[in-house]
Structure formats: C-alpha cells, structure tokens
Amino acid sequence: MSTQPLFHEKTDARTGKVKMYRDNPLYFLRRSNISLYKSFLLYLYYSIAIWLPDPPRPIGGLCMSFRTFLASRIFYRSGKHIKIGRNVHFGSGKQVEIGDYTGLNTNCWIGNDTIIGSDVMFGPDVSILSGGHNFERIDIPMREQGATPRRPVVIGDDVWIGTRVIILPGVHIGSHSIIGAGSVVTKDVPEYAIVAGNPATIKKYRNQ
C-alpha cells in the first residue's frame, strides 16, 4: 500500500531495525504547504477562538462570528452565512470546502479535505474521517508506519447529519439525505435516503 509518511526512516546501526522519528516542529506546516498568513489564522483559531462560547451564552453570537470569520479564511472555499460552533476541529483546513448556509455544530471533527455542500445541518460531536494508519508491518509499532492515502468525504446539499455520527474515509453522502444519530457510515448514501445504525443502512427514502 502506498503511503504518505508522517515519519522519516533510519536504520539503527546496532540492531539493523528501521527507526522512525518525527521531524522538527515546523514539519507539519512545511508538509502541508501552509502560508504564513494562514498559519497565523490557524494560531488565532486554535488558541483563542475555538474555546469561546456559543449562543445563547453572553457574547456567544459575537464569538461565533469571530470563529466563523477565521475559519472562512482558512478553508479552501467557504460559502456565505456559514456557522462554526465551539470546539470544531478541521486540522489545517486547507482543502475544506463548505457551501452556503451550512453550520458545523459544537465538538465536530472533520478531515482537513472534507467537501460539504450547502444547507447542511450538523448535530454536535460529528466525526468525519478521511485518513487512516498503515498496519501491514509487524516489526515496528503501527504508530510508526505512517498514514494511508487520504480519501476525502463528500457531502451533498440539504443534508441532516445527526448527533455523534461517524463517517468513514471516502464516503459520499447524497443530497437531501438524513443520517440518524449515532450512525457509523461505512459506504455511500444515495440521495433522499434516511440511514441509521452501525453500520448505517437505508431505512427509507424521503421522496417515496
């Protein structure tokens, strides 16, 4: 399996085993090719804005506007009237695309290359994954084997994603669909489908 290594490899002269180690602290920014301007925005977002309160708490509306302002300039593409709730994580966000009138609710975690359409509603604690870990080798720990190729999740327009849904890498969510709370989505969801469960299965269609 091809990899996008998070570590450099070196052979231990004494044991002959491959050792892997992290690069210097600037490795993440260099690997991600993030500009100084966006690095500053990311610093403001993750050090300050992410912890500020949501409405209806005092100044919650102002805090959400500040968070959304930063995120919209971090993302690759950002639609109008989006909302970013408290403690939303999106990695570097450099390849995130989000459409008009879409809101990411409290404690959501999305891959930094997720594509989200317009009018999408997120419940709290939703996780969207687009990467994983290699595990083929047994001579070194899995944590040292690097990452698998990324497979971004794509979400259509007018989708409702319930609380604590987990969407696995490479899944496409069709427009006008509903994902029930607590679902684990392992495969593509057709348009207008209502799915739920672990793994998520189709329960019915909204247009039938």
Image: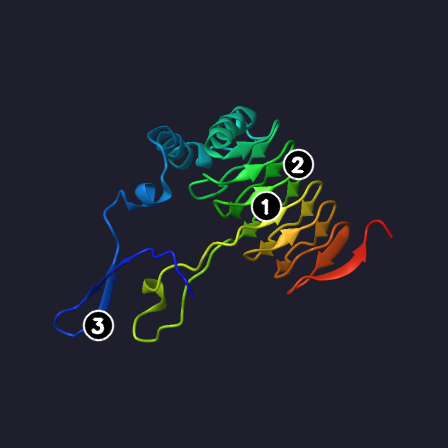
What residue is disc 3 on?
17
Q: Residue furthest front?
A: 2
At x 30%, y 71%, the residue is: 140
Q: What whole-number distance in Å separates the C-alpha atoms at marks 1 and 3? A: 44 Å
Which element is circle 3 on?
loop
Q: CA distance from mark 1 to mark 2?
A: 18 Å
The residue type indicated by label 3 comes to Lys
Residue at position x 51%, y 37% from top? 86
Give the CA distance from mark 3 to mark 2: 50 Å
Between disc 3 and disc 2, the foreground one is 3
Provide residue 13's location: percent of width, then percent of height. 13, 70
User: Residue extending furthest left?
Assistant: 14
Which kind of residue does numbered mark 2 sit on?
Answer: Ser
Relative to the observer, which residue lies in front, 108 or 158?
158
Give residue 121's position: percent from left, percent from top.
Answer: 66, 41
Is 33 located above or below residue 149 in the figure? Answer: above
Q: How many marks?
A: 3
Q: Position of residue 173 (x, y in %)?
A: 66, 51
Label 1 sits on residue: 124
120 or 66, which lies in front?
120
The residue that label 2 is drawn on is 118
Q: Disc 1 marks which amino acid? A: Pro
> Do the residues bearing badges 1 and 2 touch, measured as CB atoms within 8 Å?
no
Mark sitting on residue 61: none
**For the residue carrying disc 2, how many other residues have a C-alpha within 10 Å: few (<14), some (14-19), or many (20+)?**
many
Q: Earlier in the sequence, mark 1 or mark 3?
A: 3
